[in-house]
Image (spheres, helix red, strand yellow):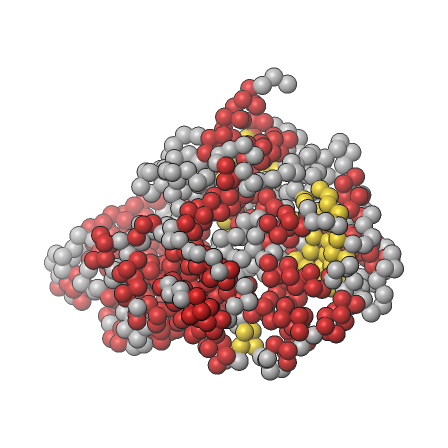
Amino acid sequence: MPEFIPRPAQAAILRYSHGKMGIAAVPGSGKTHTLSYLAADLIASDRIKEDQEVLIVTLVNSAVQNFSKRIALFMRQTGLLENIGYRVRTLHGLAHDIVRERPDLAGLSNNFQILDERASNDLLDQIVGTWQRNNLDFLIRYTTPESRDNIQYLSNKWKQILLSMASAFIQQAKDLELSPQHIQSEMVHTGIDQELLRFGIEVYQDYQNALSYQAAIDFQDLIRLAYSILKLDADYLQRLQQRWPYILEDEAQDSSALQEKILRLLCGKKGNWVRVGDPNQAIYETFTTADPKYLLHFLHEKGVQSYDLPNSGRSTYSIIHLANHLIEWNQKEPAPELLKALVPPFIQPTGQDDPQPNPPDIPEHIYLYDKALSPEKEEDMVVQSVVRWLAENPRQTVAILVTRNDKGASLVQKLKNKKVKTVELLQTSFATRRIAKILSDLMYFFAEPQSAKKLTAAFQSLYEERFEDAEEKKLFRAFCSRLKKETLVENLLFHPPEKNEQSLLEPLHSTFREIFQQFATFVHNNQNATLLPIHEFILTLSVQLFTEAHELALTYKLAEMMERAAVANPVLTLKDVAVELDRIYSNRIRINGFSDEELEFDPDQHRGEVVVSTIHKAKGLEWDRVYLVSVNNYDFPTNQPYDQYISERYFIRDRLNLEAEMLASLKNLSKGTPYQEGDPTLQARISYSAERLRLLYVGITRARRELVMTWNEGKFNNCVMAIPFVELTAFWEQYHAAPD
């Protein structure tokens, strides 16, 4: 790594010696580099004693690795030992250190265990499933009258809503330091009796009881208990303050109220605390209790030294202009309640002699495609475009950024059909989805073995990928189309072709006849296996179908999931299992435990490949060319009357956002303020719209040299171009047409 030559704005920050400092850093400004150098400089300047450390706190484990490597490098360059004088932790890792050191103050035994995300989600899934079966009246009351006849059909959709509600309630309650007993007591005290709160309390109580039974805590408990320990033991807090005289916090825009409280205690009133973040990249509000307002308040707090890191060498001038215009426009439009969704500083390019100069500017490499497309046409156009571009730029990096995992999964499939090397940053991998699809189609068929449609889907899932030749694939699909219309499925499966004169197999060449007979034999041999427990049935099929170690590992994971589902729901059917597997295939849920989230991802290691990622997972990354798709008023609403919101489901009465309603009930109860049904749903629209504006900003600023933006009319042809996209298109036409 070349020697670090700080820019003027960075140099001002590196003159820091003590006190509280807040830094607003634009995308690509080198904040990680600056913070790492500051840590090394503090150690080298003898401000850190032998028994002390600079504490660096960040958001994710991959950032921990990144910081550790950079600080170690700077330490080596100054002739110091590279692993002494600093500690890098995630906020949850820091909380874990505190709780492990003093479990007695948290009421825990020394051998307590921490449930990971997978185990925690599985536990909650069982609890919510049981609650749902016992509270059908609740579902009916919140279902629209016209949808109540389909309440059984909506069961799985309701399950996911309830799971999300339960998870958010528990997270919010723990962030507010409220136990189930506290909430129940407050409800009795105030005389408030709300169904949504009762649901939250019951699930929360059952969840905590289950944790206690296992002598376990979850990740949210770590934060809550760490804060409690620091408040209870002043001597212990003082020792930690002595141990960590400097605290450097990265990604501060993503901290929650309770996380901020922990760092304030560790810092003390006169301590040394540096907070770095970008309020314009706060994109996790929907999923966590994080809120950029905490960083914004800190930046304007009395006694805090506030600085900007405005210079970025990541992108061309044109991309910078586009991102800055989005901020500028947001100061005036599109709605009064969204005026502070994006805030200065604006991005400034670097100087000509900068070690990281901006890439050469080619305005023609900005493509804002404003024509209306169907979702499928949009995908096809993007795939065709990226294939052509890669052929001309094989050593460049490129990414397609999506807002939803299912959209990403569909694009991956189309790219793979074109034999394009693809890398995924989605919930589940292509391999996982492929196996889930095969098993799902088989479950559907074994649940309804007389159905030609289900038979065809299962057969096609298993064998279509064998045919790479275009003509053979065409013939195979033609056979499947005919198979779908067959009325006597039994004849095909259980009567040899020579005894079945009407068999579809007769006109086909030997390859087709052979593989269908293989399939028929497979079905026949496994017919009785349907009587096995669900997870054993899945494993019985899998060992016959899959041979690769990773494939078998995935099937075992799937089998475990279905075993837990069967325990939670004793009347679980093959069709229920098929539906759940189909949700994994369509990327609506993730299989925990098969994720590369902990690893540092480097786009430059994937030149000549297409990275398909959600915008959330793309944060902190950059590519030469970026495609931003689905920029419509469903994925990027701006609180307009005609906008649509993913959390407002058609079958829920009054289009209520039940999660927002429940969380508002909880907050109001804790504050003693009244709750009015419907108001939280309207407020949630504003918060979500603000977050989506920031998400669009993050997407744009992932691009180094080239940017392509497209939109589609949605599944039901009822979406329009997102207002910010309309504005950016108009701005770009004017900007591009203006003389130099």
Q: Position of residue 289 (x, y in %)?
A: 54, 57
Residue at x 38%, y 59% (from the top left corner): 161
557 or 188: nearer the viewer: 188
Give left or right: position of 496 versus 280. left
Q: Is residue 740 above or below residue 177?
A: above
Q: Position of residue 104 (x, y in %)?
A: 64, 80
- The residue furthest top is 739
Q: Position of residue 494 (x, y in %)?
A: 18, 67
Give left or right: position of 64 versus 342. right
Q: Is residue 237 above or below residue 705?
A: below
Query: Is residue 197 at all visible to an observer of this figure?
Result: yes
Residue at x 63%, y 68% (from the top left corner): 227
Q: Is residue 372 above or below residue 375?
A: above
Q: Position of residue 641 (x, y in %)?
A: 38, 38
Residue at x 21%, y 64% (from the top left corner): 448
140 or 367: nearer the viewer: 140
232 or 120: nearer the viewer: 232
Query: Is residue 551 at all visible to an observer of this figure?
Result: no
Residue at x 49%, y 47% (from the top left corner): 687
Give left or right: position of 499 versus 250. left
Query: How many numbered circles are shown?
Result: 0
Write down the quadrant of residue 56 in the picture: bottom right
Give left or right: position of 492 versus 135. left
The quarter of the picture where the C terminus appears is: top right
